[in-house]
Image (cartoon, grey):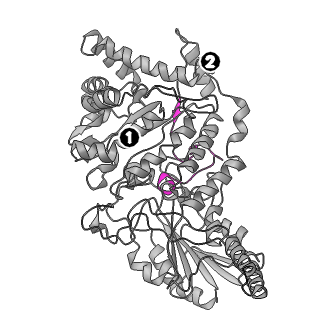
Amino acid sequence: MINDFQRGSLASRLGIPMIYGIDAVHGHNNVYNATIFPHNVGLGATRDPELVKRIGAATALEVRATGIPYVFAPCIAVCRDPRWGRCYESYSEDHKIVQEMTDVILGLQGDPPSNLRKGVPYVGGKDKVAACAKHFVGDGGTTNGINENNTVIDMHGLLSIHMPAYSDSIIKGVSTIMVSYSSWNGEKMHANRELVTGFLKGTLKFKGFVISDWQGIDRITSPPHSNYTYSVQAGIQAGIDMVMIPFNLTEFIDDLTDLVKNNVITMDRIDDAVGRILLVKFSMGLFENPLADLSLVNELGSQAHRDLAREAVRKSLVLLKNGKNESHPLIPLPKKAPKILVAGSHADNLGYQCGGWTINWQGFSGNNYTRGTTILGAIRSAVDSSTEVVYRDNPDSDFVKSNNFDYAIVAVGEAPYAESAGDSMTLTMLDPDPSVITNVCEAVKCVVIIISGRPIVIEPYISSVDALVAAWLPGTEGQGVTDVLFGDYGFSGKLPRSWFKTVDQLPMNVGDPHYDPLFPFDFGLKTESVPSIVARSTSAGVDGKPFVFLVMISLIFALYFTG
């Protein structure tokens, strides 16, 4: 399809190749069989920019495998209120973590040469893609977290919280920047000449192109598209170079042509836009290599990329509670046990595990729309062959009490959503998840895994659960969850966001006065991997402690945890 579009473009009068972009925001997420990585909130929990850079490089390969040279990523929003439906697209409430994670751009585009002038776009070859930092600027700061709404903050606040990651992205050679639907102090960003032309292109010296969001200029007016000629004028004069128009392209072309003919929009403004678009196309090598490189086809969903996603999952999980008291931790769980229960709405649902922006805009439910491993599937492959795994999505308490389970793993959380559909004033988990937690955890030792794009209400259930894990939206590689549950690796993730007690506290961010979270920003219990515990035990014996006893301990560990 992409090649057919491109051949059409090359056959036009000037033969200039077109640029095709796609929302690859956690892997090449629109494509069947692609590797789906954790959403950005989970990557923020890893605190690992080098990992994120490798994910960028893997995503670039999978996108190029389908002939596409441009991605609308990364989202570098600083989400300041989890009620926002796009909060999972933000790495953290802390702009410093978001800044560190702009290393994903180096993975997507390649490392720019040291002598590259600041602000000049860079794409390093046929296995890399043009990136797009979005959404400029303040999208994560809207009042009450309402999507596309108004960010009320002074210039100092805007520059210190929401702007720093743009400066970092430009230094790293980002090719394009997308403007936000939102407003700043009442002025639509798509019409804000001061910030788009004055600050972004002027002060920050950005030389790539500025792109609108989907129907972004239509939404300058309220209701959208009510004065389209004005919207075209305001958007182009603000400094938008490329306009995303899903439906009414002829109306846009006619209006813009008339505005230029009547000297409302200058030819200098048109030349600036065209020059910037051509510069990005030249830097990508699009004129030399406009068509797909078919040799990359096996990169899509490759085992190496799935292994990378699995690593990202295990590094992203945050352990919030481990045992009713510190002296009796539940994790790591034994792989060898007579009978265990797996329960909850999210235990065997790949769509729920991946979240929004997966195959469909709003995501999906079930296991049929792409390839991956659910948490249930991961548990079944991780435990000893003698362990009986019983799965019920919504077991009643009598069933749990009568079955003599050794322990239970309960996966609960949010259904998928994207953009405004995810705005929530209540931040509750799906029904009947609360009753599943009650029915299971009152009868048997339990680990509760929260699958969500943000902190949700969990305080009422904390006392009844033995262990609690924030797994965010991990993607297709569920084995990353079992890697840490069963102790093959230790937990290392830290909260990229403050976890509230009640929604009445929101917005609440680290550093605020009256900061009183359930779990603070940066919180995360650590565990050691079973192999390292065993190694430490045996090496301690060499130092003069009772060696035979320690060897016995290590053998028990080995049998207990690996079967």
Q: Position of residue 490 (x, y in %)?
A: 61, 68
Give the residue displayed 63% in from the left and 40% down from the top.
62
Asked if the residue under mark 2 is in contact with the one under mark 1, i.e. CB atoms within 8 Å, the reply is: no
- In the rendered image of this protein, does residue 414 appear above or below residue 141? below
Q: Which label number is shown at residue 135?
A: 1
> What amino acid type should be assigned to the residue bearing mark 2?
Glu
Q: Secondary structure at mark 2?
A: loop
Main SS class of the magenta portion in the image = loop
Whether residue 476 can be seen here: no
Give the residue displayed 43% in from the left and 28% down from the top.
118
Can you say which quadrant of the picture contains the N terminus?
Answer: top right
Q: Position of residue 193 (x, y in %)?
A: 26, 28
- In the rendered image of this protein, does residue 66 appear above or below residue 454? above
In magenta, the rendered stretch is 20-43
Q: Earlier in the sequence, mark 1 or mark 2?
A: 1
Would you identify the image quadrant in which residue 92 lies?
bottom left
Q: Position of residue 529 (x, y in %)?
A: 65, 71
Give the residue displayed 53% in from the left and 15% down from the top.
16
> What amino acid type should be assigned to the residue bearing mark 1?
His
Whole-angstrom CA distance, mark 1 to mark 2, is 30 Å
Does the segment drawn in magenta span residue 100?
A: no
Tell me if mark 1 has few (under 14), some (14-19) or many (20+) residues whose alpha carbon lies within 10 angstroms of its own: many
Q: Specify whether 32 is left or right of 327.
A: right
- In the rendered image of this protein, does residue 416 appear above or below residue 241? below
Q: Secondary structure at mark 1?
A: strand
Per the image, the residue denoted by label 2 is 288
